Image (spheres, grey):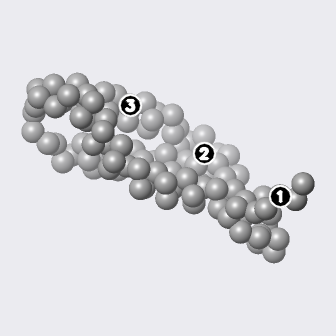
Amino acid sequence: MKHVKEFDGLCGLLAAWVLLAHVFYLSHFEQLRVAMRAGMAVDIFLILSGFIIFNLRERGETYGAFITRRFFGSFRPFSLASSSVCCSVNFYRAGPRNFTGCFPRHEP
């Protein structure tokens, strides 16, 4: 099976869908968060991922090669996203006036 560009677009839309649901959740817009139904986006993404991995066998790529390629392709964005979440959580907890940095020191 050849590369399907539409799947890339669909994955991007699903990721944006989940991101917006998280933004609405953090902003306390309960009605919008419930209306977003982010769980459905996650389900569709998992089904789509399974379909793509299953079709790798047609191209002759092994599962191990796929996982290795995906790990090295997504490690940098994952690290950036994780760091952003850590900074955001500390900022959210401390408030803008008391924010001391992304990784505050805790005195014993």
Circle 1 SS class: loop
What residue sits 45% from the left and 48% below the top? 17
Residue 23, relative to residue 66: is it above or below?
below
Q: In what quadrant of the picture does the C terminus appear?
A: bottom right
Answer few, some or many: residues within 10 Å of disc 3's Cα (few below 14, many 20 plus, some between 14 and 19).
Answer: few
Answer few, some or many: residues within 10 Å of disc 1's Cα (few below 14, many 20 plus, some between 14 and 19).
Answer: few
| Residue under pointer 1 | 106
Circle 3 SS class: helix
Circle 2 SS class: helix
Q: Quadrant of residue 68?
A: top left
Residue 32 visible in image: no
Q: Position of residue 31 (x, y in %)?
A: 64, 45
Amino acid tagged 1:
His
Question: Marks 2/1: CA distance?
Answer: 34 Å
| Residue under pointer 3 | 46
Q: Nearer the viewer, residue 55 or 45?
A: 55
The answer to which of marks 2 and 1 sits earlier in the sequence is 2
What residue sits 18% from the left and 48% below the top? 5
The answer to which of marks 1 and 3 sits earlier in the sequence is 3
The answer to which of marks 2 and 3 sits earlier in the sequence is 2
Amino acid tagged 2:
Arg
Mark in front: 2 vs 3: 3
What residue sits 69% from the left and 56% below the top? 89
Answer few, some or many: residues within 10 Å of disc 2's Cα (few below 14, many 20 plus, some between 14 and 19).
Answer: some
Q: Which mark is residue 48?
A: none
Q: Position of residue 93 (x, y in %)?
A: 78, 58
